[in-house]
Image (cartoon, rainbow, N blue to C red):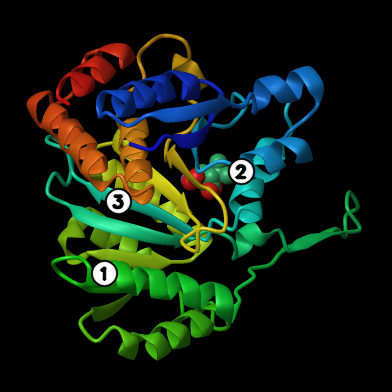
Amino acid sequence: MSSYKVGVIGGDGIGPDVLAEALKVVDAAGVTLDTTEYELGAKRYIRTGEVLPDSVLEEIRGQDAILLGAIGAAIGSTEVPPGTLERGLLLKLRFALDLYINLRPFTGVPGAPSPDCDFIVIRENTEGTYAGEGGFLRKGTPFEVATQGSVNTRHGVERCARYAFALAETRERKHLTLVHKTNVLTFAGDLWQRTVDEVAPDYPGVSRDYNHVDATCIYLVENPARYDVIVTDNLFGDIITDLAGAIAGGIGYAASANLNPDRTGPSMFEPVHGAAHDIEGQNKANPAAAIRSAALMLDFLGETAAGAAVTAAVNDFINSTPNPTLSTTEIGDAIAERL
Ligand code: IPM
Ligand code: MN
């Protein structure tokens, strides 16, 4: 059995605690990780002023995968200006490592608004409004202007669309929905729609649909069964995956994989939730999302049996313990015991 070099970024708030449980479960699944911890996030920034030094980024490039807990200062913190860690650390990792797919699976848990939902959102992860295009003009004057453009390249959209089609092909329903706002975003939406239309013949087994993003918010609440694989841009994907997490049982269960499918560098695995500073250090956070993210990592590393075993253990725990009142460590133990 090979050992994988995994960079561990616990980050802020509950991040380190949920990652500790994820590592415990990976170990119980019999996979050996050679971990290196990187102290990055609000604490380091406040202490040293550093967000992601180039030397650390270069070290991270040499890992096989990255596990990330959560990044972010407490709401209202005056020590960390908004966007410092988001743009300087999390998005920088996504862009620098070309993690162009953000894969977010949603399977409902008992008691959730949609306990039976089962779909995957493929969110483009390196372009759109996240690319950072824009700026200020005459800032601070009564005539100031702020622009924030959306960058959509044929290359970026096509590789994302192809990934989503190929994924849909492997699933039972083989159904792909493009989510956008083509009725208003007539440039970006047109590029997305044309690209999807043009690559579709390469995936003849996949049926297709299109939904506007606003309508998607209704369908996700009223009839999520219509979705199998959704492909969408960066910002729409950010927003609808919070909603998807809520209908599937809560953001405490939602996992994500930031993938570089070309494997020119490590991919990064993180729960969708944030740092939850309000429950930091209280052993209260649900580590299920982090553990599910670790399962996605195992699968991507080629440890498919171990990944499936972890997912099955998480699901078995969830199904036998709806609304767990257990602590973070107790949940981790209960899942590890099932392996
Ligand atoms: C997410 C988060 C990030 C995003 C933030 C923290 C930058 O909300 O991973 O969904 O907007 O992508
Ligand atoms: Mn988000």
**Residue 311 location in percent, x, y?**
21, 39
The answer to whether residue 72 is left or right of residue 281 is right
The answer to whether residue 179 is left or right of residue 38 is left
Looking at the image, which is closer to me, 147 or 108? Answer: 108
Looking at the image, which is closer to me, 103 or 59? Answer: 59
Q: Residues within 10 Å of mark 2 (few under 14, many from 20)?
A: few
Q: How crowded is mark 3: few (under 14 residues within 10 Å), some or many (20 or more)?
A: many
Q: Who comes first in sequence, dot 3 or dot 2?
A: 2
Q: What residue type is labelled 1?
A: Ala
Number of disc labels: 3
Q: Is residue 82 visible?
A: no
Q: Name the residue under label 1.
A: 168
Q: Name the residue under label 2.
A: 62
Q: What residue type is labelled 3?
A: Pro
Q: Who comes first in sequence, dot 3 or dot 1?
A: 3
Q: Mark 3 points at which residue?
A: 105
Checking the image for residue 224, the label placed there is none
Q: Residues within 10 Å of mark 1 (few under 14, many from 20)?
A: many
**Residue 286 location in percent, x, y?**
32, 23
Relative to 30, is 99 above or below?
A: below
Q: What residue type is labelled 2?
A: Gly
Q: Do the residues labelled 3 and 2 touch (CB within 8 Å)?
A: no
The answer to whether residue 128 is left or right of residue 33 is right
Q: Residue furthest front?
A: 1
Q: Quadrant of the C terminus?
A: top left
